[in-house]
Image (cartoon, rainbow, N blue to C red):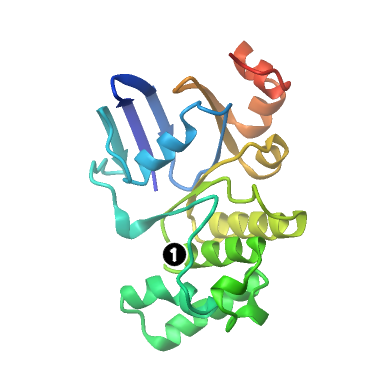
């Protein structure tokens, strides 16, 4: 799903926390958002997800430039996801049942996602008995179950072990390449951004400072402030 932003702003109590003059994310992108705390990363993600409304400007979805958020074609996975108090397989199946999928198609999709994310042996496990990494993988499987056109993730591997991180990253690459899902994720892990994201945008003080191919931006950024952040400097 293509995203186009023009003069997008968000204010809270008269304080502007987001001010993006122009941003284009093409259909099929795998884009990482980096930046210091308070840069506006989560605000941007929540605006794209339609969870909050902008103060001004335009946020357009798809090639037709629709202003209404296409809720049925996109999904957001939080850093600390919430699962329904039932089994793993019923969590994954939930969006499909809401959409009226046939039982056989639901079963096929559960098998596929559980296999890809190492959850086959956990299908009948109760959600409240899962570890943090297992919970994150179930949340991702549930988000991907209905084949969204846009997947938004807020720090999806911040609280999981390296093995689970690798499984999640493999899954994100797979659905991006094989299903054409546009993936946008916030990450504080610059190594992950370099490893996973084909394009990266650096945000600071509510603005997009730099946006470009991940390899170039993370190795040889054009902007001095981006360079200082990548080198580990605390930006003030």
Q: Nearer the viewer, residue 150 or 213?
A: 150
Image quadrant where residue 226 sits: top right
Q: Residue at x 57, y 36 (%)?
A: 199
Task: Where is residue 44? Give x, y as percent.
Answer: 41, 35
Q: Residue at x 29, y 52 (%)?
A: 70
Q: Is residue 166 above or below residue 5?
A: below
Task: Where is residue 175? Give x, y as percent.
Answer: 55, 59
The answer, for residue 223, to whether it is visible in the render is: no
- Of all residues, the one furthest to the right in this rendering is 162
The answer, for residue 75, to whether it is visible in the render is: yes
Q: Residue at x 30, y 35 (%)?
A: 59
- Of all residues, the one furthest to the bottom in this rendering is 104
Number of numbered discs visible in the structure rendering = 1
81 vs 220, left or right, is left
117 vs 154, left or right, is right
Task: Where is residue 176? Give x, y as percent.
Answer: 54, 54
Q: Which residue is mark 1?
A: 147
Q: Nearer the viewer, residue 182 or 165?
A: 165
Quarter placement of the C terminus = top right
Task: Where is residue 13? Give x, y as percent.
Answer: 29, 24
Q: Nearer the viewer, residue 79 or 62?
A: 79
Q: Secondary structure at mark 1?
A: loop
């Amino acid at each position: 799903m293509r995203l186009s932003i023009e003069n997008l702003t968000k204010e809270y109590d008269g304080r502007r926390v987001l001010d993006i003059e122009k941003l284009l994310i093409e259909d099929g992108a795998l884009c990482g958002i980096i930046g210091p705390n308070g840069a506006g990363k989560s605000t941007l993600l929540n605006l794209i997800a339609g969870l909050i409304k902008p103060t001004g400007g335009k946020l357009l979805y798809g090639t037709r430039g629709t202003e209404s958020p296409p809720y049925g074609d996109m999904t957001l996975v939080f850093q600390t996801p919430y699962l329904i108090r039932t089994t793993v397989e019923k969590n994954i199946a939930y969006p499909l049942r809401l959409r009226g999928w046939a039982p056989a198609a639901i079963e096929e999709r559960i098998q596929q996602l559980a296999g890809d994310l190492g959850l086959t042996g956990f299908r009948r496990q109760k959600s409240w008995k899962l570890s943090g990494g297992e919970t994150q993988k179930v949340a991702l499987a549930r988000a991907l179950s209905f084949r969204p056109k846009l997947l938004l993730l807020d720090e999806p591997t911040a609280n999981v072990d390296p093995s689970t991180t690798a499984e999640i990253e493999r899954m994100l690459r797979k659905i991006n390449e094989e299903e054409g899902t546009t993936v946008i994720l916030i990450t504080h892990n610059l190594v992950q951004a370099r490893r996973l994201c084909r394009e990266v945008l650096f945000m600071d003080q509510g603005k997009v400072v730099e946006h470009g191919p991940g390899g170039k931006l993370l190795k040889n950024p054009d902007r001095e402030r981006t360079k200082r952040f990548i080198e580990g400097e605390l930006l003030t």
